[in-house]
Image (cartoon, rainbow, N blue to C red):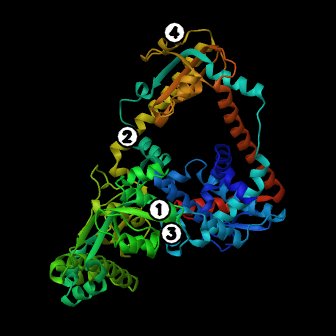
Amino acid sequence: MLTFFRNFFKTKVGLAIALAFLGLIGFAFASMDVSSTGAFGGVAGGDRVAVVGDEKVSTAALNDAASEALRRVREENPDATIQTLLAGDGLDNVLGGLIDRYVLIAWGEENGLRAGRNLVNSEIRQIPGARGPSGNFEESAYQAFLSAQSLTDAQLRQQVRTSLFFRQSVIPATYGTIVPDSIAETYARTFKERRRGFVAAIPAAAFAPTGNPTDAQLREFYAENGQRFVRPERRSLRYASFGADALGETIEPSDTQIQEYFRENAEDYAARETRSFTQLIVSTRQGAEAIAQRVSSGQSFAAAAAEAGFRTAQLENQERETVREQASAAVADAYFSASEGGLTAPARSPLGWHIARVDDVNQEAAKSLASVRGEIADVLRERNRQRGIAELATTIEDRLADGASLTAVAEELDLEIQSTPALTASGFVYGTQQRAPEALLPTLDFAFQIDEGEPEIAALPDGQNFIVYEVATITPSATAPLAEIRDNVIAEWRRVRGNEGARAAADRVLKRVEGGATLAAALSAEDVALPNPDGVNITRQEIAQMRNARVPAPLALFFSMAEGTTKKLQGSQDQGWYIVALDDISLGELEENDPLIAQAKGQISQGWAAELSEQMIAAMRAEVGVERNPDAIAAVRRQLLGEPN
């Protein structure tokens, strides 16, 4: 059964169904163990943010889930702050995902589903990142995978366990969703749909005040819109890099090491003979001898083989031991006793009877220690370098773990410590477009997770050099003081007030259009000169082809409106408003067996499956029972934002 589910997830439909649900619980996947019920120190409102069935969702679990969600958001937007995450319904989304995970497990256990340790272990062994060079599970590879994903073993096991309950409960209920052909054809016909109308932009700049606000207005605006002026967290680092040069003369091999290497690898320097052959293998000794007889009578080896119905094969630069291993000792003896240009005596192997012509004999004399001394020294020097740098890195790591300071390590290795200005998590010097030092870029993600004065060591991407670093200062993300950004706040105040004016203008224009005026006439009636509306004449299929570009919001609204309607739409970042008027909708013809029908059927099936998944989770929540604690949730929000409780 589990093999079936695993294979199902490899299909497009299976993947879509899984992602539809996992998107709901993604924030919570890497949070702490579900059994955690410890109090969230200093948080008012109780020690639980929700109760799912008989299980408590602790404030600590929500705090950890929010921190993990922020880390994942920063993978796409390194400058994201906790304020960014919690804006709007951010914390509710995190809590919703966390609750759904508890619900899945509780409902599954109540209904006899299981995801025991052995099954979890089996799933972990399937993770590609947990496999070593041999392709099998290796503990070292698994630990490296956990480190790269910033997960603990317990956290990953909870992810896997939740996924197993999902695959045993939700997937079977949504598998095989079939859409009737009539619905698929209707949906496919919409791709041929053509819409005509107009889009008008009402820019905020046209209504922005030209004068400055009063001090009272500015302070009020600043207090109400503090999130607009949040500075990202900044950190300055101290670091020193080192490579093989830190090992000095210790990597130079001694005479004893060179001699020992020469003795251990004597076979590589001994005299050797290699031969090239044209070979033939037949099933009987008589057949081999008959071919040899024809060659002895003057017929070419290839012709004799062809006459007997066989084809020869080439063997290049073969050693006796290689032939012995691949064929047999008898074949090796026969092949290496014949003279160059001669034909070998028939000899047997498990494959049959071998006969060959010796095409070439190459004799290499034994090499003396003196002749290969430089070569061996290079090999040992590289070996000592790799071993030495790895041992040095391990020693430094141990010393740092024991409490050694960055300064002490740098002094011992005679390294120069460098300092950076304030850096952002995106890798730039704060307030500029200057990049952080190249050597630090691979470490920045982790550097923004550790505390001040905790030195760390990391390997650089080239694998040849290392860096020892620590966080010198941390400037938390916070709203910038008004006195420092007064001009920026004034500019933002103008933009927001202009956007408010644009909204009022959009309402007036919309009212005129609803009263019978054309969109162009409604715009020209404004006291402020506004751009003329742009005509739109486009099909849904043309919209669908904008795969590599985001569909503009007005066009997205254009294809969700009813014919003959006009709507307003807010622009992004307080830049203004849009008026969208849809005058006409026409449907194109759909050919019989048009490929769009199959495409539509697949898309609707995915949507239906996703909807069924959401409905099933909602039913699970209702059956298990979920109770939220608004006071504790608000307290966690305040603590995450650094506000007093």
- Asked whether residue 414 appears in the rendered view, the answer is no
Q: Is residue 600 above or below residue 274?
A: above
Q: Which label was assigned to residue 134?
A: 3
Amino acid carrying label 4: it is: Ala
Q: Find disc 2 in the rendering and name its residue.
A: 490
Answer few, some or many: residues within 10 Å of disc 4's Cα (few below 14, many 20 plus, some between 14 and 19): some
At numbered mark 1, what does the secondary structure look like: helix, strand or loop?
A: helix
- Of badges 4 and 2, nearer the viewer stands 4
> N-terminal of the two: label 1 or label 3?
3
Q: Nearer the viewer, residue 263 or 416?
A: 263
> N-terminal of the two: label 2 or label 3?
3
The answer to whether residue 18 is left or right of residue 354 is right
Q: Find disc 1 in the rendering and name its residue.
A: 288
Q: Is residue 216 above or below residue 126?
A: above
The residue drawn where x is 57% and y is 23% is 541
Answer few, some or many: residues within 10 Å of disc 1's Cα (few below 14, many 20 plus, some between 14 and 19): many
